[in-house]
Every structure is written in C-alpha cells, then in structure tokens.
Amino acid sequence: MSFGQIPYDVAHLLGGGMLLSGFVLLYQRRLAAMTGAFAAQGALLALAVAWQGFIQEEPGLFISALVAAAVKAVLIPLALRAFILRLGLQRRVEPGLGIGASLIAGVALVALACLVVLPATAGAAALLREDLAIALSVVLLGLLMMVTRRHAIGQVVGLLSLENGLVLAASGVQGMPLVVEIATAALVLVLAGVAGFFVLLLRERFESLDLSLLHRHRGEGE
Amino acid sequence: MLISTLAVLLCCLPPLALLGAWAGGRPGLARLVHAGTALVAGGFALLALAALVEGGEAALLLPFGPAWAPLSLALDGLSAWFLLPLGLCGLACGAYGWRHEAVAPARRLAAWPLFLAGMALALLAGDGFTLLLGFEGMSLASWVLVAAGQAPAGSVSAGSVPAGFPAAGPAPAEEEGAARAAAGLYLGFALFGAACLLPAVGLLAGLAGDLSFAALRQAPPQGGVAWVVLALVVLGAGSKAGLVPLHGWLPVAHPVAPAHVSALMSAVMTKVALYVAARLLLDVGGLGQGLGWGVPLLALGAASALFGALRATQEGDIKVLLACSTIENVGLIAMAFGLSALLRAADLGALAALAAAAGLLHVLGHALAKTLLFLVAGEVQHGAGSRRMDRLGGLIHAMPKVALAALAGAAALAALPPLAGFAAEWLLLQALLASWRVGELGVQVLAAAAVALLGMAAALGAVAMLRFWGLTFLGRPRAPRTLGASEAAPLPRAALFLLAGLGAAVGLLPGALLALGGEAVARLSGHAGGVALASAWAVAASPSASAYHPLGLAVLLLVLFVAVVLALRWLSPRASVRGPAWDCGFVAPPPHLPFGDPGTQPSAAGFAQPLLRMLGTSLLAARERATLPPPGDPAPARLDSHWQDPVLPALLPALARWRDALVIRAERLRDLPLRHLLMLAFGTLLALLALLAWVGPGGGAGA
C-alpha cells in the first residue's frame, strides 16, 4: 500500500462518522428521528465505500457505493418514514436502555472491538486495522440496538445498521474477492427479511408493533 | 499416480449411492450398485497392494474444501495397509450383496457405497480435517444401514415348530423395535466419539491451524495438552472400535444389519477406528512421549480382549457371538499398539516394531476371518432360517462347503497354527514377554498381567470359536428347518473361499507381508528399520530368540495329519461305515421327533455353563437359582441361570437422567421471548470476542 496520509485520514473520518451515527441510533428515543440518523449512516457508508473504491482503484466498489447511497440513504429511510406516518408513530417515544447506560455500553463495545481487532491484525496496514475495528464496532452497536429496542422498527433499524458495518468491513479489505456481490447479497438478504417481517405484521393487523405481542406467535402453533 | 487413481475410484462411490437411492425395488439396478461397489473395493485392494510394494506417495490436495484446511489425500504405508483389508472385504461383501441384497430397500442401497466411501476417505486422509470428515461419513452411513437393517421378510420364517423345540425367533414388529433401539444406541455412541475426536484434532493442531499430518508430526502434543489428547482419542476412537467400557453398542448394533454390512462394520469399521487411534497417537503424536502414553491402550485392550472373549463364549446368537469376538480381537490389536508406544518410549525400537507388526498383522488376519464368518452367518440365516445356535446344528451335511470355509475362519480366529491369528498373537506374546527389558517396575507388572490376560483371552476365544463351529455345523439338527438348509450360491461361496484362501496366505506368509508393510511398522513404532528379522519364511523377535516358521509348521502338521490318516487306515483297513448317531443313552427317537430329541444334545447355554460358573459370576454378573419343589409336590425343579453385560445397564440410566435434565433446560430456553433470544446470541458473541481478546494475537489468525 503506497498511499500517503490523505487516504487514511478521509477513510478514518468517514468510518468515524458512521460510528458516531451508530451512537446516535443507539440513544435516539424518537422513532422518526431514528430514520434520519440511519439515513446519515447510509450516506456515510456510501461515501466510505466510494472512497475505498478510489484508493484501491477498484471500480466495482463504486457500484456498491451507488447501491448503498440509493437504497440505504434514500429508499429505506423514506419507506420507514412512510411506515411510521401510516401507523401514526411520529411522536412515539421509545426509551431503549436509557441514554447514559446505552452510551456506556456502546463505548465498552467499541473498546472490546479495538481489543480484539488491533492485536489480531498486527501485521496489516494501519488503514485496514482501524477500518476493521470501526466496522466491528458498528456491527456490535447494531446488535446492541437490536437487543435493547423494544419496538419492531427499532430492531429493524438495528439489523440494517449491523449490515452497514459488515459492508464497511468487506469494502475495507484490499483484494477481497466478490466484495460487490457480497455487499449486494447481504443487502438483498436483509431487505427480504425486513420486508417479510413487515408484511407479516401488516397482514396480521396488529394494533401495536410492540414485540411482546409476538412472543406467543413464533410459528410454533398453539 | 496411485493416489489420483484412488481419488477417481473414491469419486465413483457417490454416484453409485445416487443410483442406489433410485434402485429400491429394482433388482437389476441394485445388482449394478453392488457390482460397482465391489469393483471399486477390488480396485482399492489392488492399489493398496501396489502402494505397499512401491512405497508411499506425496499428498494430493483436493480442489475443494474449507478455506483454512484444504482437503488432502495421501497414501503412505500405514494407510495402504489398512486400505488392503477394506478392499478385500468390500469385494467379498459385494459378492454377497449381489446374491442376497438385490431387493434391499433404497435407503440401504444408497448408504452402502457411502459407507465404503467414508471408510476409504478416512484411511486416505492426508490431514486431520479429511480424516474426521471420512470418519463421520462412515459413522452416519453405517447408522443408516443399521437403522434400515431389518432382516428381509421370510428369512427368519419359523413355520410350524413341533413341541420340544426352542421357541422361534422374535416377531417382526419386535425385531423392528430392536433395530430402532440399536440404531439409536449406535448413533449415541457415534456422536460421543465425534465429540471426543473433534477437539482432539483441534488440540493436536494447536493455534497454528495447519492440520496436515506432516505439519502435525512436527509438533507432537506436550504436557497437559498431550494427556487431554490421549484421553480424547482413546475415548473417541475406542467408542467406535468397541474398547471395553464403551463396547456396549457393538453386540447390539452389529448383528441388526444384514450380514454383509455387519461383516464390514465388524471387520473393517472397527479397524478404521483403530487406524485413527494409531495415526493420531502413535504416528502423529507419538514422538517423544513418556511411558504412560501406551498404557491406556494396553490396559483397555487387555480388558476388552478378556471381556469380549468371555462374552463370545456365552452368546446364543451367532452374529452376536461374532460381534463379541470382534471386541476381543480389537482389544488384542489395541494391546499391540499400546505396547508398541510403551516400548518406543523406553527406547526399545526393535521391540516396538515387533509389537506394532503384531497389531498390523492381526488387523489383516482378523478382518479377513471376521468378514468370512459374518458372511457364513448370513448364509446360515438364509439357508437354515435362524441365527440362534439352539435352532441350528448338523449343517455340515446340508452346507458342506460353507462349513469348510467357516472352519477356516474359526480356526484362524481361534489362533490355531499355522493360521493368521496364531502368527499375530505369537508376535504379540513375544513382544510382551520381552518387555521386562523396560526397567520400570510398574511396566513389568503391567506386562505380566497383560500376558496373563492375553493367554486367557486367547483360550476363551478359541473356546468361543469351537462352540460356534461345533454347535452350528456338527451334531444333529436341533430344528427340522435346519434339514432343509441349502448350500450357498456359487458367487458367495467363491467369496467365502477367496477370504479363506487370503486368510491362510496371511497366516502362512507373515514375514513377507511384514516386509511389505515395513513403512507402516516404522510409522507406528518410530523404528526406521521395521521388523528386522522378517523374511519370506520366518519371523523372529531377535536373533537369539526363537523364530516362527509358519510354512515349516504347516508342512509338519500336514505330515503328521497324513501319518495319522495312514496309521488309522493301516490299523483298520475296512471302509468306514456311517451309523446312527448315539443319543447319549437317552430313549430312542420318539415318532414326533424323527431326528432325535434335541434335549440329548448340549444347548448353546449348556455348553457355555462351566465357563459361566467359573468366570461369569464376577465379570458378567451371572446368577443361578435352583428352585426345588417341596417333597411330595410333582412340579418340576427349576434352574434359572441369568447373566448380563454389566457395563451398559450401569451406563444408560445415568445417561438418560442427564439427557432428561438437559432437555428440561433446553425446553426452558425455547420459551424465552424473542428479545431474550437475541440477547443470548449477542452475549455469546461478546463472550467469544472477549475470549479472543484475552487469548491474544495468536488466536486471531483468521481476522
């Protein structure tokens, strides 16, 4: 890797932005505002992937970036927002874990990710190492969001943010084969899962999307 | 060249399995499956022989497999030595299947080639991952064969049984239930073996991640890890081979399958398990280990030999008897391997080579003889309608050729000179008797005890084989159905005589064979020279010790036999006349029992009773109770005799309790809400990451 300081800084900046929006997602209490934060994360992901395509001279990554920008920064947030409007949830306050506690837990997860990734990749380039650490942090934050949120939309956003982290990791590794295909496939997989989930919810006409109603309906029959 | 040909042959087996899945109820296709499998097995045998003659080959990396461990095939002397009996026995079993298994259900036809493929893959593996892949494939395929293994309808037909004959076999429904229970037990033990072997291979590889045998051999396990590996491999491979505390499934599961499957399971599958133990413990991990390294195999092997032989003298079902005899012989081979490791640790290379040679020779001899006897058991079941010795007898008149072949197999297993069993046990005894040269007192005591147990096991094994052959083929028929027995068809008969001939060759030419298997001996014993004193005609433990000349012994026995025959002719020149059988002074045959009262012949249990009284009370929990009616009461006196294998009944209730407790916990887990399940996954991930962070940079090879 023969690039200088600028590629490293910009990649770091974009990754850090994603991490920051991950934290925003984690503590944001209002569902409507959550979609905005998710759109920001998607846009940052698209930029980060495009930047990686630029410094790795990998034109395929630009396609990934375009797909990410179109789907994650625009389409999914719009759809989520429409969904929230339709269900009348604009003012719904959904307290996850509490701001302080969730931030502390998030910081601990980032520390764990750094502890795992940095020693394990001792021989690799600094850019790759930091990139992987950030990506793992984003994945873990997404998981934490899925665990702490009670509302279905919150959990879905957590899943999507987790997938953002995976795409970031895949795009950061130089020379990894089939990055574009993997990223697209992961996106399709997540989208299919999310769509199926909502179709199921709408068809069953639940009054609320509170998941506690789902506990008795996990496809096990009565 | 050899190895790629073998890979091609191996690749022929899955298509045959597909064909078999389609061949249920189509006899022509089923025959094609059996013929194809037999041809592939024959190819295995030829290539194994070629590899033994020409020497090993470099590993062949397969173009598929997981990213961290490319699958590789390799063929060194040790693999080739174990591949040889697989090929020969597979060939013979294919011939049997051609004749008797043309209308088998599709499940069995599909699993049969896969069973062979799994065993061959385990033997040809060049790395730990492929080894486990083949081993587990073999386990699964044989499980299917056991589960689908009910005897075809009508083969155990009882017909109308006159009063006075022992009761007919169990009803079909009962038999199906027994097969299912046996398959469940078998699967449980197979899973246990897998649960032990997987971490063992992982520990052998350590954090380096290279699983190829060459790399593993460079870094044998040390310290505490070594002991854990030893325990796991002995438990994992021992549970598959049937070493003593883990043998409970073997007499239950082996007889349930059809004869050719039982034959391959008993003769070759147990050997594959021993191969895994030998490969992992003696070849890969054997360098620089202490004296204790061989002790578990030696001790468990001795216990298995004694226990299996004793049980074999007591069983009434011929297939169960043969399965118990397999436990005995597996024990003998494990003893030889354990002794070899012990002698190697004591720096007695030539003796270690001798012990390893004894084990390897017995692998070959026992595989051939046991396949032969299981196929004979199948022929007897087809021809005479029963497997219970209490319903057989006098079959030498109805099936003379099968009886002759069975005699060859039984004599080999009874370790009669100059046959295969004797050569192997002689070598093992030589090595054991010379092991006093290890200075440690504990080892000397152990060796002395092992000699005593080996002698007892050999004698009991001989009794078991005598009882098997005598009660089945000699005497008078115990059931009228036996008289209607028909001789085996030409093809299976040819297979039987092929096996008998090969077994005799192993017995007569042990020196030449061991010279061929020099690389295998060297790999197991770490002694580069192999068995130094093995020539085509003789084997010897050391220049000063006595040598064993099997061919000379055979000639001597032949001369003696001819002399006895001539002497008898000379003493009684008139031609022999066949008279009525003596009924031991009982009444003349009553009209409803034209062939004599079966009560005048010893029954299977009666023949075994002296041994049961001598040895069974402690080892087999044998109990006898005589109930005498009070004076004046005309009721008959009763003698109730009962024995059982104490290990499995002691093991199963505890296991069932654990399973129940586990199931209750798991059920509680199932009722968790969705969020808690997510939390569980998240927590597990965090714990694994924390472990990775704690173990340190060496653990993150994949990141």
Image (spheres, rainbow, N blue to C red):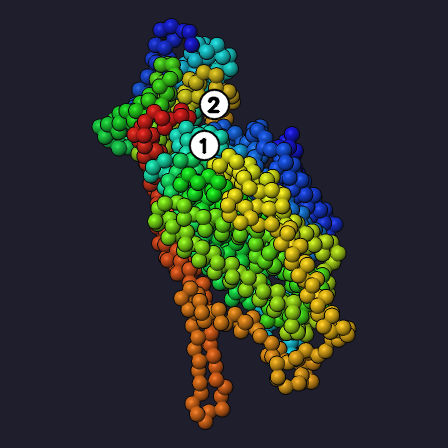
Look at the numbered disc 2 and give the secondary structure of its residue: helix
Residue type highlighted by circle 2: Ala
- Are the residues at dot 2 and dot 1 in contact (C-beta closer than 8 Å)? no
- Where residue B428 appears, x then y in whole percent? 50, 50
Which residue is at 49% across, 50% downward?
B430
Snapshot quadrant of residue B164: bottom right
Residue bearing the label numbered 1:
B216
Q: Nearer the viewer, residue B466 or B259?
A: B466
The nearer-to-camera label among 2 and 1 is 1
Give the Cα distance between marks 2 and 1.
37 Å
Q: Is residue A108 left or right of residue B682?
A: left
B536 left or right of A8 in image: right
Q: Quadrant of residue B575?
A: bottom right
Given residues A119 and B398, the one toward you in this image is B398
* Badge 1 density bin: few <14, some 14–19, many ≥20, Cα 10 Å: many
For the question of whether residue B23 can be seen, the reply is no
Q: Looking at the image, how many numbered discs can be counted on the residues? A: 2
Q: Quadrant of the N terminus of chain A?
A: top left
The percent coordinates of residue B282 (x first, y second) are: 46, 40
Give the image quarter of residue B646: bottom left
- Look at the image and tell me whether residue B127 can be seen: yes
Residue B457 image position (x, y, % from top left): 49, 59
**Farthest residue toward the left?**
A100
Q: Is B589 situated above or below B219?
A: below
Which amino acid does the dot numbered 1 rest on? Answer: Leu
Placement of B236 over or under A48, stated as above or below: below
Give the residue at the far front of this rendering.
B544
Left or right, B503 with respect to B436, comes to right
Q: Chain of mark 1?
A: B
Badge number at residue A108: none
Q: Residue at x 49, y 52 (%)?
A: B429
Instruction: Return the mark for residue A183.
Output: 2
